[in-house]
Amino acid sequence: MSDTDLISRATGELYKNIDAMLDSVMKKYDRESNTRIWHGRPAVLVKCLSALFSLYCIYVTLFSTAMPEIRLNVFLGLILILGYLHYPIRKTPSEILQGLDDSISIPITFDTKARSNSIPFYDILIMLAGAIPFFYFAFNAESIIKLALRVTSPRNPNYHLMITMAVLAILSTMELCRRCVGIPILCVVGALMVYAFSTVRFGKVIYDLFYSTGDGLRSTPIEVCAKYIVVFIIFGAFLERTGISTFFINLANAIAGASAGGPAKVAVISSALCGMVSGSSVGNTVTTGSVTIPMMKKTGYKPEFAGAVEAAASTGGQIMPPIMGAAAFLMAEYMGIPYSQVALKAILPAVLYFAGIYIAVHLEAKKLGLKGIPKEELPRILKLLPKVYLLLPLIVLVVMVSMNIYTMQFSAAIAIGLAIFVGLFNSDERITPKKILEALEAGGRGTITVAVACAMAGLVAGCITSTGLASELITMVVNVSGGHAFIALVLTMICCVILGMGVPTTANYCIMAATCAPILMAPAIGIEKICAHFFVFYFGIVADITPPVALAAYAGSAIAKAPPMKTAFNATKLAIGAFIVPYIFAFTPAMLFENVSPLINITNAGPVLTQILIACEIILICATALLGIFGVAAALNGFLYKPINPIFRIIICAGGLSMLVPGLVSDLIGLMLVGFVFTVQYMKKDS
């Protein structure tokens, strides 16, 4: 065998091992990745079923005129079938071995006890027991709707059958949730169901949770999932297979790779771009982190810092417009505003989040004296320009959705077609019929977790509706907080972070939107509707990097070979903007471009001049907020041109926080404080 063949074979084995390593990290920290192992014909069958499910969802959301009770029941029935085909009753046992090469820095997992092509008989029974009631409801929807509450009344001749089917469907869906989402959300659902059954008639609760047309399993979350989210998940799967992730990483390298601490800045930029498409904190951490974390370590960053940068940036991808993961569509539905407005209002907080991380890694690089990647090793922007056509599907989607040319789902379908089209021209990662099938299969598989999470959120909302618990929760929080909005916000933040530990953002937001957001909007608290929903959305996301259950940070630590808790605390420190900004826009909606009024009021100003003044005010808000996040990041890092003493760190932090609060007085105070410390540091930089 020639040397060339040996090198080629060794390279192939290396890549194969790297894929196995990444898969092991995903299985450990991401429930969605812990699926059954299928090989051969069974694998083809399962993939084809998932692909057909995706095609069915696209067809239904575009063309179906069936009543919601038919559409959503069939959707949930199919979700249960696919869910039990994919997710086993427990995690696959495995043993962890260390990687081949320290430069790769990823633990390899070899599954030693995993059985392939196996589904136990009890899983088949649970699957059928859960799916059949949904299909029965779909085929008998009209008669069940006419019966209304009588369907679960003891006077109904089929009372026992209807109750049994509803209970089986609910329990089967909850078990699937345990497998693919996690236990924390089940604790919430279980506690609420116990409360509901103990205070309301059993048949009434069952009706509200399963047979009701507007509450329970078929409430707003699952309606939005089946109508919008599933198509955008499929679009994201197709977009990833066009090679856009590679393009984003190369683009980030070309922009920031050569600067001080370049690999960390590449991680921030590429994770922001890739994360808005993937919508998964752990998935994005593993995907981009497999490239960026070893580069950061090689540059000189500590392992725990490298893992934290990737985790914090990947988590923030879900707040990055225009896609923002799946929750953005639910936000639009709950807040009653167009999706395009949700994306617009999210721009400044997202920019502040990533600006804070970017500034922190820059200051860390300066403090450690780190260099960037040699320019000769980086891709050139001019060579990347021919690949810019890969952005076409994303651009067309944003334009169509923003201008309301077509419905969101039809716009997503057009974008899917464009993704296939542009993928044909990418010679590096050309899209093929096999990749189209893989994208459809990935889209169908990715929908399972989101749909189940939305179903659980529906159960939460159903229990609250049945019991009238919402008013009691509002009264309780108002009493505990004494009517002080800040205390109510802190309590809400704690709830969001605890519930978000190991729970997908979508489910977390749905539950918080049904429980905590109305509390914040109560007259006694007084937080505006849009601000309340953005508040719970943000703190649901940062749970992925907040100890003690910081799954994204733990995934980053596994790749970086760093202590998990150190990585999690570093990630929390880097993402400080996500803990500060929500409080600011809760009290000052102008940060979300809500209720913006010009600082200068001109008498008899015409509509054109008024709009110009408002635009200037928005620009001022953005500029001062960016300077503010710079001050906070410098204070936390303790370095500007040289180490900052504790007194100056307090001063620049206070100045940064002042500028983050929109308002002329706060901006001027903050500017003076930050400017003072900056000037002193600059003058002493050579001393």
Image (tube, rainbow, N blue to C red):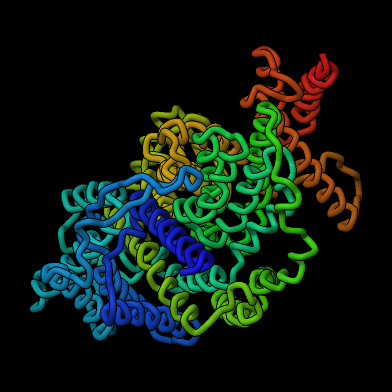
The residue drawn where x is 81% and y is 24% is 675
Q: Is residue 540 left or right of residue 248?
A: left
Residue 677 lies in quadrant: top right
Q: Is residue 279 left or right of residue 323?
A: left
Residue 632 lies in quadrant: top right
Q: Which quadrant of the rendered structure holds the C terminus?
A: top right
Residue 576 appears at what percent x and percent y?
57, 34
Residue 273 appears at what percent x and percent y?
62, 57
The residue drawn where x is 39% and y is 30% is 479
Residue 416 lies in quadrant: bottom right
Q: How many marks?
A: 0
The residue drawn where x is 39% and y is 63% is 450
Closer to us: 669 or 90: 90
Q: Which quadrant of the rendered structure holds the N terminus?
A: bottom left
Closer to us: 146 or 285: 285
Residue 433 appears at what percent x and percent y?
49, 84
Q: Is residue 531 left or right of residue 640?
A: left
Instruction: Look at the picture and state if 163 lies above or below 647.
Output: below
Residue 624 visible = yes
Residue 509 appears at what percent x and percent y?
44, 52
Residue 660 visible = no
Closer to us: 474 or 325: 325
Instruction: Look at the picture and state if 253 lies above or below 67.
Output: above
Instruction: Look at the picture and state if 167 lies above or below 66.
Output: above
